[in-house]
Amino acid sequence: MFTRRGGWLVFAGVIMISVGFALAGYLSLNVMFDSFGFSPSPNSTVPGESESTEGFGVMDFLHFYMDRQGTLIWFFIIGGVMLIFSVLLGLPFYRLGANPKSIEIKRRVSKPKAFAGDYMYIEVTARNRSVNQLPTVEIYDAIPEVFDLVLGENFIVAQLNPRQTVTYGYIVRIPIRGLFEIGPTKVIIRDRMGFYATEGEIKTKTEILVYPSYEDVKKLEMIGRKRQLGVLFGFHRTKIKGMGTDFWGIRQYQTGDPFKFIDWKAFSRSGKMMVREYESEENIRVVILLDSSASMGAGLPRNTKLEYAIRSAVLLIHLAFEKSDIVGLCVYDDKIRNWIEMTSVRSQLFQFLEALAHAKPQGEADMEVAIDYVLQRVKRAAYVVVLSDLESNPQKVVNAVRRARARKHNITVISPFGPWFEIVSQQLSPVEQMIGHAMVEKQLGERQNMFKLLRRYDSTSVSVGPDDFLPTIMAQFNRMQRQG
């Protein structure tokens, strides 16, 4: 309740009263000793000694004033009482008007949803609903620690008259994706002299959903402005006979076949009506399995394995939509956290982005659970792209790949390798670097053994680091296009 200034005044008053009573006690003892002849008066002289010609000392000064009806004693006591009462008497009047709940807080954000890296303007309005004047009001709007305050301040110090409203704003930059809360708002009310302060918290919170960064997609679009895009059909060759342009083979004419496909040269050679057949173009089907277990949260701040995996998933989803392919998403750890049904409708992109925005590292990865969940919902053969660090039970990973291959799905595992995300050689001593390299070699050996097991089921496995994560995603997607 008391500020530092008010507390020091009360403390000074107590000290002055204590000094006053101490002096009063000293005077009483001095008088008592004098009455019994134990102590001579400061101004008296001892027989046989000459009177001192020097000035008064400190004790002489004290005795001089204490002898004057206790003037010095009363000065300290009355002064201390006045200091204490000057602070305490105003307290009831302050408490009548200082109520943080009398302040109404409203917050407005420029957009409730944004992409990582975007800037956001936040405006805070405070209104004094009471009939009392608030001489000094401090308002602090709490923002997440990861937000960067780039312009303005998230607090204000102002005087609020009855029914008065004050507004201030600031701009923040949101560097990472996720679900964040702005608030609560802390309010501190001080009196005019600065003796008292009342602090309260107004629980007004605003949720901000931040989608993963779209910068990688923007760069890709800038580079590929001149690329031809498939609008009605994908560019992926498949071994299915149909109405495409790539030659499949020749067969004998059957009733109902279009005349435009008759191979007249073959007819002239064999004397039989032959029909040319072509490969059809069909969109590929892609299912993204994103591991959001606790181990995926390792790495440098704001550049964890999970953040790179999410950026890669955004890029892969964009590439699929660009080619009118069918894509689905499964976010999992020890259970399914999110599932987006397979679709080729680009307008549903924000469903994917929202699912990725909510992903957070937790639990332990169980790829078997994820594969079983996907197999129940994806009946036709598809390309399953697994984004996982494979730091879970190796046997579960092998079992999951075997089950997917049994259903004719193609499996591609793109695995961020932990040490490549966590070790910064420049910050390590030579000994620490040697130990780190030894650990890396050991983990690489274990990983290679797992990859050998996965290759038995005709799956593709790739280890990636921060520098080659996104290029690997694009290379693997192009491989899927060629395979069809």
Image (cartoon, rainbow, N blue to C red):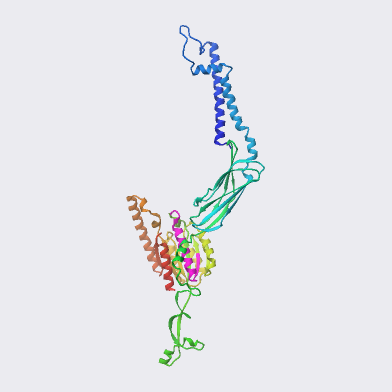
Specify whether residue 317 is painted magenta.
yes
* Residue 320 vertical position relative to residue 428 in the rendered view, above or below: below
* Residue 6 vertical position relative to residue 219 in the rendered view, above or below: above
Specify whether residue 425 is painted magenta.
no
Q: Position of residue 41 (x, y in %)?
A: 52, 12
Q: Position of residue 261 (x, y in %)?
A: 47, 86
Rendered residue at 32%/50% (across/down):
431
Residue that extends furthest to the right in the rendered view of this protein: 131
Q: Position of residue 36 (x, y in %)?
A: 54, 11
Q: Position of residue 230 (x, y in %)?
A: 48, 73
Q: Is residue 135 left or right of residue 392?
A: right
Q: Quadrant location of the N terminus?
A: top right
Dominant SS in magenta: helix
Q: Is residue 476 left or right of residue 36?
A: left
Residue 337 showing in the rendered view: no
Residue 259 showing in the rendered view: yes
Badge count:
0
Q: Nearer the viewer, residue 338 or 221?
A: 221
Residue numbers of the magenta segment: 300-329
Q: Quadrant of residue 65?
A: top right
Q: Nearer the viewer, residue 239 or 320?
A: 320
Rendered residue at 35%/55% (across/down):
439
Residue that extends furthest to the bottom in the rendered view of this protein: 271
Q: Quadrant location of the C terminus?
A: bottom left
Q: Is residue 160 left or right of residue 418?
A: right
Q: Nearer the viewer, residue 313 or 110?
A: 110
Q: Nearer the viewer, residue 42 or 386?
A: 42
